Each structure stands twice: as C-alpha cells, then as structure tokens.
Amino acid sequence: MQPFSVPVLPTASASRIRPRTALLAIADSNYRKRLAEILTGLRWQVREAEGGAEAWAEADSLTPEALIVDSWLPDLHLGEFIRDFRQRFPDVDLVTTGGSGAEDSPRGPYRQELLYALRRSQDTDTATWNTAPQLGGPELAGPRKHAGPWPVPPPLAMPLSGAASILVRPGAARPSPTPVEMAHPEPSAQSSFSRPAAEMHAGRREAALPDRLPELIGNASCMLEVSRRIRLVAPRMTAVLIEGPTGSGKELVAEALHRLSLRSRKPFVAINCAAIPEALLEAELFGHTRGAFTGAVQSRVGRIESADGGTLFLDEIGEMPLALQSKLLRFVESGELQRVGDNETLKVDVRIVAATHRPLVQATHDGGFRADLYYRLAVFLIRTPSLIDHAQDLPLLVAHFLERMGRDAPIKRIDAEAMVKLAAHDWPGNVRELEHVLERASILAGDETLLTAAEIDFGLTVN
C-alpha cells in the first residue's frame, strides 16, 4: 500500500521565519562573532563590519533589516555616523550594543529578537569572565562588556634593544632596562591587573577614542591631531589640502582619507604633478583624443576621468604650471573637463585631495600659485609634522619598519647604541629617510639579526 501523504501548505509562522539580514558594526571581533552566532541561530543572515566606513559599504551592497552598532567606532564619529545612516537608510532598525534604538529610528518587527541576542551575547561574555582565574583579586570578577575572555593574564610587550620586543608574563624576571626603556618607562604589570575590570574596559575605550589611524605610526599629540582631522573630514566631500615636508607621509594621509570615505569602493588615483613634464601633464590629467598632438596614436582617458566616483590625489600641486592651474580651477568649480583635442565636455564626480611640501599661501603672494585655486583646494587643511617634531615616536617607527622588512626576510632587531645614534640625527628626509636608513642597515648587516651602530649609515659625506 502506498503511504498516504498530506501536502503541507505554508503557514503564517513559516513565512515569518524567513531569513532577515542584520549588519553588525562592532570593532571587537570576539564580541561580534559571538553576537553573529546567536543571530544566526535565530535565522538571521549576518553581515559583519569592523568600523563605520566598512558598515557603509556593506549597507550599500544590501538592504539590511537591522543595524547593530557599537557604542564607539574606531574610524568614524559615532553621532555623525548614526545621523548620516538614519538619513540614508530611514527604514533600517538601528540599535546600539547598549540595547537602545537611535532617535527617529523605526522600531522594526524583530526588535525583541535583536535585544534578546544582545542580552545573550553579553551574558555569555560575563559568564566566561566570571569563570576566569581571579589573578588580581575578587574585583576582577565584575562583568566586562565586550572584550573577549582572558584565561590567563595577557603577556606584556616589553621593548628590548630599542625596537625589538619579547613577551614577559607577570611575575617573571625582567631584563635590565635599556636607555630607551629608561627614557620611556612602562606602567607596572601589577597596577594593570589590580584595577577593576569595568574600569580597565572603560580606560581602554577612552584611550581608543583619540587613537591614531593604523596608517600613521606615532602617538605624539601632533600625530593624533592628524588622525583626528582625517576622521572628521573623511566622510564628507570637502576638498582637502595636505601640507608637510617631504617624506612626512602625505600620501598615507590621502589614502586614509579615501579609505574612511563613502568613496572607498571607488578608485583612488594619484598623480605627482612634479614628476611629469609640463608638456604632458595636461594630457595626463584630462586625457586626449587620437591625433591631438604628435605621438597621440590613440585616445586616452585622463587621471581625473579614471577617478570618477572616487578620490583624485594631486601630489606636489604647488609645482603645477600656472597655465594648467586655470584649467584645473575650471574643473574644480564646475566638475566638467575637456580632453585635449576634443570639443565636448564630460561631467566627472571626484573628490580632490591635494598635497604640497611648501606653503602655498606664500606661493600665492609670490605669484607662483593662483590664489583662487588655493582657496578652492584648501577648504580643509591637514599638516603632516616632520619627524623631528615627534621624535618620541622614533622607537615605534623603527619597530614598524623592521617588522615590515621582516615579512620577506628574517626579522632583525636593533641595539641600544644604534637607537641612540638614530635619535641624535636631525632627519631632514623625515620618515622616508628613516625607512631608507634602516633598509640600508639591514643590507649592511648581512646575515646578522642584530643591527648595531656600525650599520647605521646616513649616507652623508664629511668635508
């Protein structure tokens, strides 16, 4: 006998459990993963983002029903992000990790599921923390909000020989401090583990708010100011002028502006105005048609047009010829360009970021740069400091470059005498010079893994 089966029609409850999409904008990867697992168990499709700029990109590629955003973002100002997100996506249910909805945010039909997932993720974190060894006293048993559990105390990174570091467990014997360490003493391990967990977590959050961007190595106040200005202006369309000495990282600032902007998925096109001959610079910027000049055997798209939708970085803008400055001014004002040899105009949408190693204000007074173009480009000014202005960041920079060179070869360390020699230099070439000096020292050291003062060669000749 054939089995008798009854077709099952979809019910309201079956249609109600269709997958929904939730976007998580949370920097803490452990907390974000835990929350994503809980939401997935509730039949949500989850997309993850580490910061605000990545969340913007994810939201543009899908239509989420809900956004859960952390109480701080590592790259964008939280208040501005929420306000702009609400304007762009007014129908998305926006909830913070604290469980509160954003102002004017519609309360979605699945708000209770979101709040339940938030409670579950935080309860799981608290339970894990409460079972961890009580190394610093009973006060450490208090709940931590987002950070992942530490089954044993984390290792303390202690500089050795200037730039290299070793990992030392609390209570272990510590080697004798180097001159660099004595100049920059670190807090004791005991004090960091005797603070209440909630206070430690709050301190980490407060310290993270003014933190530098990953592209910019250095914790000096002038470097933190550069990071702050980048974060403020990056989400906007405002034209930015970067001023700073040669080798101080102006292109890194431009790349960070693009990465944190809403144009991050579009091209970032850079052109050095001082590296291209004057006769070719116009065609390089605006493009040309076939036969427009001798050697133009085919039409070519210019750098401006190729950056459509993204960011155009004009490096060494102060070296641009005056005749070409007037043509650039017309494009900045109207957004329209005309290829060399063509009568038609094209509308191009780009954000302009310019850079110069010399003060353009003085150049406008001397007649070497158009004042009207300067004021169009310098709507927002960012100044990159010379290395001598944040010399206290020298150990960080040395460690960064040695680690980067160690990706393709055995990583090398530097001893205290070499660090003293580096610190005594005045660095006219700034950070770029430091990178080249360390690369030269690494080559001179051969197979040796320790760089000494003998390998530090500044390439200077003595008369």
Image (cartoon, rainbow, N blue to C red):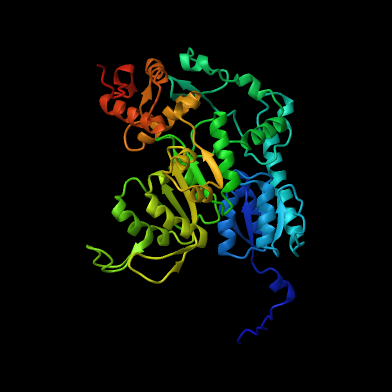
Give the residue drawn at x 58%, y 64%: 62
Q: Is residue 173 visible?
A: no
Give the x, y percent position of residue 48.
Answer: 58, 54
Q: Which residue is found at the position 28% from the left and 69% from the top?
A: 290
The quarter of the image holding the C terminus is top left
> How many numbered dots are placed on residues in this image?
0
Residue 346, picture quadrant: bottom left
Q: Is residue 95 left or right of residue 260?
A: right
Relative placement, left or right, of 96 versus 362 is right
| Residue 432 percent location from the top left of the image | 38, 33
Quick one: which residue is furthest to the top in this view?
176
Above or below 246: residue 460: above
Taking 327 as reference, is 68 left or right?
Answer: right
Quadrant containing the N terminus is bottom right
Residue 244 locus on image (x, y percent)? 46, 36
Is residue 130 something that shows in the picture?
yes
Residue at 34% from the left image edge and 64% from the top image edge: 340
Q: Nearer the viewer, residue 341 or 461?
A: 341
Q: Is residue 185 above or below residue 133?
A: above
| Residue at the image position 63 percent from the left and 33 percent from the top | 207
View extreme (bottom): residue: 1
82 vs 454, left or right, is right
- Compare residues 139 and 432 and report the one nearer the observer: 432
Q: Judge by depth and name the residue closer to the eye, 423 or 398.
A: 423
- Residue 248: percent from the left, percent from the top? 43, 35
